[in-house]
């Protein structure tokens, strides 16, 4: 088993699948090694919602791009036939939907083996993965700090080198934030590029999307090839491209016009957040791209007000559906404080106000599309400061106001959710570590449907400043 662990130490998902295809290693050996690795680190990071070892062992062999590669699926709005779906909440009890999400089906068909589900905060509304149900998921770089949210369990597991990548979803930054916190590559695709069915039509009014947190850029591209394409009856469909995303990485990156944002509006950037994005900008310039400092073209407080006019009614609708399904209304005491704040203040807004919020999103999308005619890519910090300590952005009780919630949560992460509303692709790239040896990612945003531009740039940055060998102190490696 030592040789298997050494292999997993060195290989990304594509390389592991190649070893399986060459019969240098078997899927069973990879599976058992990944289980051993997870058991090694999970007591420290607390990143697993449910272990699925037996079902993974019993799963039929499937050939595909990732034949035999082990991974995990996020325990949030992603049903799996064999798994509980708690969505990070006490209210769901032991609910088991008994069907596969469309993306899960596509991942399964690619040959992946699911060894568990990863933790998430209740209904994905927090930028830290802490819940009453599962406790705090900790950052492998420093266990006193958060792994981010809402795909924090996935980020902690991948950063700790248990598996090369893990499924995540993103309604306001939930792939990019934990990727920044844990030193990973995290891409949020364009609205409608990956399916959200069959349970979800348009998560959070079209803000929600699905992809993965990875170590290598090429794994992210290959996974996008696996999951992209609208499912039947999808309300949105992003443009598709003839060349695969993986093959597009072989194309020469043209010089890009990059707009750099150094101001978070009403929220201050820490010195290290500013240093991180300036470091990234200089790296881009050294690679032949042009960088121009711009004012962020969105009024952030106004945006977040509209965002919660969409998020809160959608969350209330889900909570009421849950009550109907179980035959008893969900009680306030079953919900986290943040959820209760959102539902109390915005859950019952009028249909007119909800429609106005959706129109705000669409208007913003058109404005950003116009802005992006001058630039190929927009660059911002992913976060305003280094990953917070456990509990630092989960201090409000249920009597706090929504304004206080926004100040605490979005003052930490002001830039990501905007691009869920506009539908543009965005990625967090790990290019900077603070004096405390904590990662701080940089967010790049592309034009709608232009994932290849972002992936090609990310691959160029990865080659110029490799990050795969930056290993956190808590890790599952063999040495």
Image (cartoon, rainbow, N blue to C red):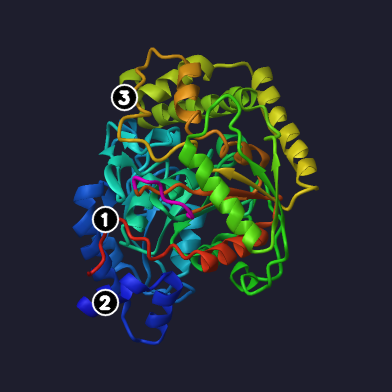
Helix, strand or loop at mark 2:
helix
Inter-mark Cα distance, 1 to 3: 36 Å
Q: According to the image, label 2 marks what residue?
A: 4
Residue 434 sits inside the magenta stretch: yes
The residue stretch that appears in magenta: 430-436
Q: Earlier in the sequence, mark 1 or mark 3?
A: 3
Q: According to the image, label 3 marks what residue?
A: 334
Q: Earlier in the sequence, mark 2 or mark 1?
A: 2
The location of residue 103, given as percent across then percent down, is 50, 56
Q: According to the image, label 1 marks what residue?
A: 473
Inter-mark Cα distance, 2 to 1: 21 Å
Helix, strand or loop at mark 3:
helix
Q: Is residue 198 visible?
A: no
Task: Write the residue at 25% across / 46% down.
Answer: 46
Residue 123 falls left or right of residue 457: left
Mark 3 burial class by Cα count in 10 Å: few <14, some 14-19, many 20+: some
Q: Is residue 467 visible?
A: yes
The location of residue 11, given as percent across then percent down, is 38, 73
What is the chief secondary structure element of the magenta stretch?
A: loop
Residue 379 sits inside the magenta stretch: no
């Amino acid at each position: 088993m030592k040789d298997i662990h050494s292999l997993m130490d060195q290989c990304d998902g594509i390389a592991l699948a190649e070893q399986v295809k060459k019969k240098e290693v078997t899927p069973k050996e990879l599976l058992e090694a990944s289980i051993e690795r997870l058991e090694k680190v999970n007591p420290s990071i607390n990143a697993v919602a449910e272990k699925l070892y037996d079902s993974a062992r019993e799963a039929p062999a499937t050939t595909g791009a990732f034949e035999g590669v082990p991974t995990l699926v996020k325990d949030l709005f992603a049903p799996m036939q064999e798994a509980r779906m708690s969505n990070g909440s006490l209210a769901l009890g032991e609910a088991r939907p008994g069907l596969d999400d469309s993306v899960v089906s596509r991942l399964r068909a690619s040959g992946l083996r699911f060894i568990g589900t990863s933790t998430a905060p209740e209904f994905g509304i927090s930028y830290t993965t802490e819940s009453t149900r599962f406790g705090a998921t900790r950052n492998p770089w420093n266990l006193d700090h958060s792994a981010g949210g809402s795909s924090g369990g996935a980020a902690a597991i991948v950063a700790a080198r248990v598996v090369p990548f893990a499924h995540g979803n993103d309604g306001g930054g939930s792939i990019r934030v934990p990727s920044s916190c844990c030193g990973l590559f995290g891409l949020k695709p364009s609205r409608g590029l990956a399916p959200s069915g069959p349970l979800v039509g348009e998560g959070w009014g079209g803000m929600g999307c699905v992809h993965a947190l990875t170590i290598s850029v090429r794994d992210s591209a290959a996974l996008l090839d696996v999951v992209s394409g609208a499912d039947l009856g999808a309300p949105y469909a992003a443009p598709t491209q003839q060349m695969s995303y993986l093959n597009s990485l072989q194309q020469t990156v043209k010089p890009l016009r990059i707009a750099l944002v150094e101001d978070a509006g009403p929220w201050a950037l820490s010195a290290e957040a500013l240093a991180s994005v300036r470091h990234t900008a200089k790296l881009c310039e050294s690679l032949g791209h042009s960088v121009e400092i711009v004012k962020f073209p969105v009024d952030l407080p106004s945006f977040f007000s509209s965002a919660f006019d969409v998020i809160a009614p959608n969350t209330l609708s889900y909570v009421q559906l849950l009550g109907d399904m179980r035959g008893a209304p969900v009680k306030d005491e079953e919900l986290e404080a943040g959820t209760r704040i959102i539902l109390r203040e915005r859950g019952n807004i009028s249909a007119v106000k909800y429609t106005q919020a959706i129109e705000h999103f669409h208007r913003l999308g058109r404005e950003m599309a116009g802005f992006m005619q001058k630039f190929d890519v927009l660059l911002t910090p992913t976060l305003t400061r280094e990953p917070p300590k456990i509990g630092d952005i989960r201090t409000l009780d249920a009597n706090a106001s929504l304004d206080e919630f926004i100040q605490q949560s979005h003052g930490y992460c002001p830039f990501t959710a905007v691009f869920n509303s506009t539908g543009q692709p965005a990625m967090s790239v790990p290019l900077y570590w603070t004096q405390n040896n904590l990662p701080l990612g940089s967010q790049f945003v592309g034009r709608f449907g232009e994932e290849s531009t972002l992936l090609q740039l990310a691959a160029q940055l990865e080659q110029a400043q490799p990050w795969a060998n930056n290993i956190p102190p808590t890790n599952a490696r063999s040495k």
